[in-house]
Image (tube, grey):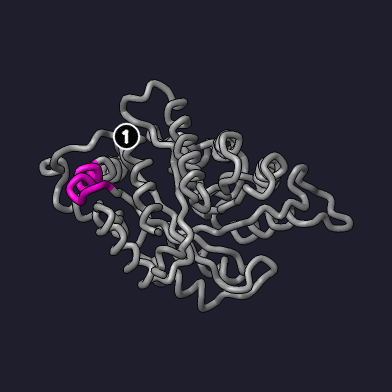
Amino acid sequence: MTRLATTPLSILDLAPMRDDDHSPAQALQRSLALAQHAERLGFSRLWVAEHHNMDGIASSATAVLLGYLAAGTSTLRLGSGGIMLPNHAPLVVAEQFGTLDALYPGRIELGLGRAPGADQQTARALRRDRLGSADDFPLDVEELQALLGPRQPGQQVIAMPGAGSNVPIWLLGSSLFSAQLAAQKGLPYAFASHFAPRYLHQALRIYRDNFQPSAVLDKPYAMIGVPLIAAPTDEEAEFLATSAYQRVLALMRGQSLVMRPPVESMAGRWQPHEQQAVGDFLGLAVIGGPEKIRARLEVLLEQTGADELIFTCDLYQLEHRLRSFEIVAGLRG
């Protein structure tokens, strides 16, 4: 069997807003449709990501959105990819995810990020008087593990719900810090190569070389992010990919991130240095028809030894996103 046939596949969703949406409800409803589709196709998990002050992303209240998705599905594992821990007190996160686990036992996961997921002004608005920072991340992770673990004699602060739930914790990263921390703690690790592929191989090497077995894992488990744009033909996939190019370009220019329809050509829409920057951002992107997708994914799995792939898919039309995941799921047969 091929590597692709035996590798778990998952989805990362940001509840993208389109330029013709009249309210965020439309984006959130599309996220539910995607989760239901992922469940039917046999994907391992679907995660949603916390971002703030971005008009093109509707997944800011991550735990609330996960409850909506869990209520509309029955078996799919759902989680955060991730909760940006500097923005939150660990007790609040433990109570939120403990509540989700109590309502949907065995289906909820907690991916944790070290970055704020927002600019400094937005971070201040989120935290107010809380003095949290990325430097607190290791201690915050440790506190969360304790709050979600078995209640200890004399423990003065408990998460209710949350205590004893043992909600699975993942550490996420786009640099090398969390790779080292995940290795030390024996936790599963997800690398954000869907937007920051530069340090992928180095991060995986650090994680695997320094991994210490734990009660959670006896060996390393690494998941990597992959931008996916699959279509019946290479030509259609390249056309549809222009929506993703426009969105990344808007991010780099500090413009609106709402999804825009694909265009026949990006010529005249970006400068050469911008085209290069978008290419670097999407350096791990898998774009094409079924055979091109299959070949690229097999090479990627061979080069990285990834235990799991988690796909992003920035396409304008929901039906094209759903079709992309149908295509990649069909390649496993």
Work out whether 36 lies above or below 147: above
Q: Quadrant of residue 259?
A: top left
Residue type marked 1:
Gln
Q: Which residues are magenta?
A: 231-242
Front in this rendered view, residue 317 or 248: 317
| Relative image position of residue 109 (x, y in whole percent) | 60, 51
- For the stretch drawn in magenta, the main secondary structure is helix
Q: Which residue is mark 1?
A: 317
Taking the spot 60% from the left edge, 65% from the top edge, the residue there is 187
Residue at far bottom of view: 209
**110 to the left or right of 95:** left
Observer-nearest residue: 179 or 244? 244
Residue 303 on the magenta span: no
> Is residue 258 placed above or below 82 in the rendered structure?
above
Q: Position of residue 228 (x, y in %)?
A: 33, 51
Q: In the image as oriented, which residue stretches furthest toward the front?
A: 333
Q: Is residue 238 magenta?
A: yes
Residue located farthest toward the left when viewing the structure as drawn? 268
Look at the image and tell me in which quarter the C terminus lies: bottom left
Which corner quadrant of the image does residue 5 belong to? bottom left
Q: Position of residue 164 (x, y in %)?
A: 77, 53
User: In the depicted view, which residue is nearer to us: 135 or 192?
Assistant: 192
* Quadrant into which the N terminus falls: bottom left
Q: Position of residue 96 (x, y in %)?
A: 66, 41
